[in-house]
Amino acid sequence: MAIGVYFNPAAMTAAQYDEIITELEAVGAGSPAGRLYHACFGSRDKLQVFDIWESPQDFDKFGETLMPILQKIGIDAGEPMIEPVHNLIRG
């Protein structure tokens, strides 16, 4: 079952987000298995993230890599909102 995951950190700047992406790519997790969709949006000083994952297990596995990177950069991602995906239209 696919899930949608929404993160709304208290504060995440564009520079911090870009650093997270660089760190993920450096450890081979820039395009993790099971992630179907990724969007980062908001103002440059208050970004949010929305992903769609093939399964909760894929998301949990990615979290093992992501969370230490967020901690290193000083991002408190808070508790994500996770919901089942009813439909996904591409394009």
Image (cartoon, grey):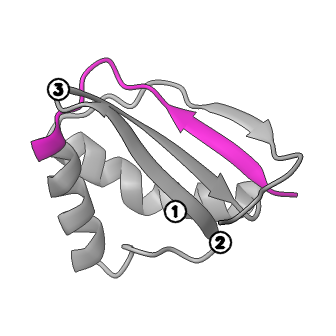
- Kind of residue indicated by mark 2: Gly
Could you tell me residue 55's position as x and y percent? 76, 60
> Residue beneath label 2, please?
34
Could you tell me residue 6's position as x and y percent? 56, 35
Position of the C terminus, as image quadrant, is bottom right
> Residue beneath label 1, please?
62
Distance, label 1 to label 3, CA atoms, is 25 Å
Could you tell me residue 24's position as x and y percent? 29, 67
> Residue beneath label 3, please?
45
Which residues fall within the magenta stretch? 1-15
Mark 1 is surrounded, within 10 Å at the Cα level, by few (under 14), some (14 to 19) or many (20 or more) other residues, namely some
Instruction: Specify the quadrant of the image occupied by residue 59.
Output: bottom right
Mark 2 is surrounded, within 10 Å at the Cα level, by few (under 14), some (14 to 19) or many (20 or more) other residues, namely some
Cβ–Cβ under 8 Å for marks 2 and 1 = yes
Cβ–Cβ under 8 Å for marks 1 and 3 = no
Q: Is residue 85 magenta?
A: no
Residue furthest out toward the front:
91
Distance, label 2 to label 1, CA atoms, is 9 Å
